[in-house]
């Protein structure tokens, strides 16, 4: 069996860390990216192919030329807020692009796929303490819909096309490679931890807390923050799982820590770890922000033999801070 993995979207945040982890686990790696959001100096594959998801022929040739065994598919437009303003590009890229990738896999005879999904497929689950994969998909924005649609496509196509597919539903990806080789640099940045770090570095005047009257211990929203290196390890485990399994099917697995941190806890942790103080402003709730989004991660642990090992809050902030202060 070839050990070569095609990392589509491998120049991005989670893809670059996963490429590093795949190489360390002994896999051959080919990064495929159109650089719409990725970075050339974050490509750690043995090979790089510059191309778009929509280019089915180039994807097919790449899979054949490099004797690809498995595909990990990170490439997507990721900003949920923007997807409400301009939804169509999200469906073209995230859904249409994935159909093109599936066509290419079909023609090239590649059957194993790990797909980047998201906790956004659950939508608003106010009454649920920990989100389990058995909950229905009920996204509330076009970004979440585009991911849920891909999951539905995979679920309904696997048998007919002999696909072995895993959708990994990430919670809040954060942190950076402990050796400083990669880190988070989205543009625009919308994720909480890098924004708070910007405030601590004086790169923004303040950090805003949207909503302080939620039904949570300190009134601010609670999320499940998972270190990007733990996500990367989850992908390596998912590829190994598919290679062992060798039967067509679809599974969705949550990649989260199972523990929640509030917005105030993140702010306090950045103050503690960085030693810098900064202005915090309280604002009203944003529409569509649930109080509490935390993973039930038992199934991923059981199926993949995976556990989050780097996701205590201080490690996350320390790695993110070190990366930001050196590179951004
Ligand atoms: N960052 C998070 O917290 C988070 C949470 C849940 C799910 N996800 C999912 O994880 C995946 C990766 O997220 P990320 O934070 O690394 O994003 P990112 O923007 O850093 O990486 C995405 C990569 O895909 C590439 N890309 C996008 N469209 C492409 C196309 N049409 N053809 C070729 N390449 C294309 C971009 O250039 C970029 O390198 C996404 O699918 C995202 O929806 C991310």
Image (cartoon, rainbow, N blue to C red):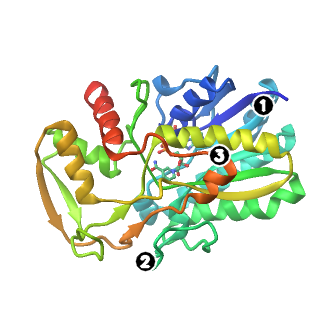
Q: Secondary structure at mark 2?
A: loop
Relative side of 213 to 71, left or right: left
Residue 69 visible, this angle: yes
Asked if disc 3 is less than 8 Å from ligand 1, the answer is no
Residue contact at pointers 3 and 2, CB within 8 angstroms: no
- Residue at (87%, 40%) from the top-left corner? 109
Q: Are the residues at dot 3 and dot 1 in contact (C-beta closer than 8 Å)?
A: no
Above or below 317: residue 301: below
Whether residue 2 is situated above or below residue 236 in the rendered picture? above
Residue 121: which disc?
none
Task: Choose mark 3 or mark 2, whichever is in front.
Answer: 3
Nearer the observer, 99 or 322: 322
The image position of residue 136, as x and y in percent, is 62, 74
Tell me the distance, in whole angstroms, between the alpha carbons under discs 3 and 2. Answer: 29 Å
The x, y position of residue 242, in whole percent, is 77, 44
Residue 68, labelled with which disc?
1
Q: CA distance from mark 3 to mark 1?
A: 24 Å
The residue under the point 66% across, 27% down is 30
Q: On the rendered structure, is 22 left or right of 174?
A: right
The C terminus, quarter of image: top left
Query: How many numbered marks have been drawn onto this rendered protein structure?
Result: 3
Q: Is residue 258 left or right of residue 286?
A: right
Q: Which mark is residue 305?
A: 3
């Amino acid at each position: 069996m070839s050990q070569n993995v095609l990392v589509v979207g491998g120049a991005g945040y989670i893809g670059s860390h996963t490429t590093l982890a795949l190489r360390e686990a002994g896999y051959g790696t080919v990064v495929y990216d159109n650089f719409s959001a990725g970075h050339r100096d974050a490509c750690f594959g043995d090979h790089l192919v510059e191309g778009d998801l929509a280019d089915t022929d180039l994807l097919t040739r790449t899979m054949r030329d490099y004797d690809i065994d498995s595909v990990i598919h990170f490439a997507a437009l990721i900003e949920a807020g923007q997807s409400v303003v301009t939804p169509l590009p999200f469906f073209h890229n995230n859904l249409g692009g994935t159909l093109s990738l599936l066509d290419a896999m079909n023609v090239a005879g590649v059957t194993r796929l790990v797909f980047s999904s998201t906790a956004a497929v659950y939508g608003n689950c106010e009454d649920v303490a920990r989100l389990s994969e058995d909950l229905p998909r009920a996204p509330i924005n076009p970004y979440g819909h585009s991911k849920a649609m891909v999951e539905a496509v995979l679920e309904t196509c696997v048998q007919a096309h002999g696909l072995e597919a895993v959708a990994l539903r990430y919670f809040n990806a954060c942190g950076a490679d402990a050796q400083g080789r990669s880190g988070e640099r989205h543009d625009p940045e919308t994720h909480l931890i890098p924004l708070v770090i910007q405030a601590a570095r004086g790169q923004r005047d303040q950090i805003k807390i949207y909503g302080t009257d939620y039904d949570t211990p300190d009134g601010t929203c609670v999320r499940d923050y998972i270190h990007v290196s733990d996500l990367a390890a989850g992908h390596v485990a998912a590829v190994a799982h598919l290679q062992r399994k060798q039967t067509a099917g679809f599974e969705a697995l949550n990649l989260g820590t199972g523990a929640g941190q509030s917005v105030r806890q993140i702010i306090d942790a950045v103050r503690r770890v960085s030693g810098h103080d900064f202005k915090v402003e309280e604002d009203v709730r944003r529409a569509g922000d649930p109080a509490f989004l935390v993973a039930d991660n038992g199934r991923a642990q059981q199926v993949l033999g995976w556990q989050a090992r780097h996701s205590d809050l201080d490690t996350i902030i320390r790695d993110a801070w070190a990366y930001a202060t050196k590179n951004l």
